[in-house]
Amino acid sequence: MRVKCVICDKIESINDESLLAKRLRNRPIHTYMCDACNNRISEKTKERISSGNFRLYRSRPNNDNW
């Protein structure tokens, strides 16, 4: 299966029977990122987290006793 990275538009081929290929075929919301882009984004995110300027906004759990 040929896939295209959503960031750098690099075209790669992956195994048709792989889990990633199945996800891309059956769920159109999933997108493909090449390894280089994925590593670059993860490194930049780790740098931002370590700098202290990164906030992860999560919803607070409701503690209803009803």
Image: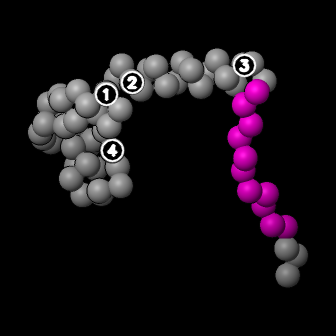
Q: Name the element at disc 3.
A: helix
Seen in the image, is 46 located left or right of residue 41?
right
Determine the residue positioned at 78% across, 24% down: 52
Q: Which mark's residue is nearer the viewer, 4 or 1?
A: 1
- Marks 2 and 1, the one that precedes in the sequence: 1
Nearest the viewer among 63 and 38 is: 38
Asked if the residues shown at circle 4 and circle 1 are in contact, with their CB atoms under 8 angstroms apart, the answer is no
Determine the residue positioned at 64% across, 18% down: 47
Name the quadrant of the C terminus. Answer: bottom right
Asked if the residues shown at circle 2 and circle 1 are in contact, with their CB atoms under 8 angstroms apart, the answer is yes
Vertical comparison of 63 with 58: above or below: below
Query: Residue under circle 4?
Result: 31
Q: Is residue 59 magenta?
A: yes
Query: Residue under circle 1?
Result: 8
Q: Is residue 17 magenta?
A: no
Seen in the image, is 33 located left or right of residue 49?
left
Seen in the image, is 44 located left or right of residue 52?
left
- Marks 3 and 1, the one that precedes in the sequence: 1
Query: Residue under circle 3?
Result: 50
